[in-house]
Amino acid sequence: METIVILVCYNGKWVTSKKMCKYEGGDSKGLIVPRTIKFAELLDRVHQIGNTNSREDKVCLNSQFWWPRMSGST
């Protein structure tokens, strides 16, 4: 089963500076999940991490991607 790593940051805020976004403050937890994870399953995991109630609390998901530079690219 192919997996991916997701870093969940919470109780902080996103800050934009010089066209870059970064997350300040709060806590973070890394997850290793199957590449085929369903969105509803991911939301359940995020609610567990944040200790929130999925029926009462809303979650806002933002994403930022990093990937390794391929050899020969500039």
Image (tube, rainbow, N blue to C red):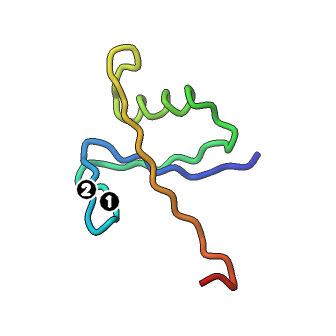
> Residue pushed farthest top?
55
Mark 2 residue crowding within 10 angstroms, few (<14) / some (14–19) / many (20+): few
N-term mark: 2 or 1? 2
Dividing the picture into quadrants, the one containing residue 60 is: top left
Task: Give the number of the disc on residue 55.
Answer: none
Query: 60 and 20: which one is in front?
Result: 20
Point out residue 69 in the picture as x, y percentages from the top left corner.
Answer: 61, 75
| 46 lies above or below 10 | above
Contact flag, marks 2 and 1 (Cβ < 8 Å): yes
Residue at x 25%, y 48% (from the top left corner): 13
| 8 lies above or below 24 | above
Dividing the picture into quadrants, the one containing residue 20 is: bottom left
- Looking at the image, residue 9 sits to the left or right of residue 44; the answer is left
For numbered disc 1, what is the local secondary structure? Answer: strand
Task: Give the number of the disc on residue 22.
Answer: 1
Point out residue 9 in the picture as x, y percentages from the top left corner.
Answer: 36, 47
> Residue pushed farthest right?
1
Q: Quadrant of the N terminus?
A: top right
Point out residue 40 in the picture as x, y percentages from the top left corner.
Answer: 55, 26
Three-letter amino acid code at disc 2?
A: Val
- Looking at the image, residue 73 sits to the left or right of residue 45; the answer is right
Q: CA distance from mark 2 to mark 1?
A: 5 Å
Task: Give the number of the disc on residue 15.
Answer: 2
Mark 1 residue crowding within 10 angstroms, few (<14) / some (14–19) / many (20+): few
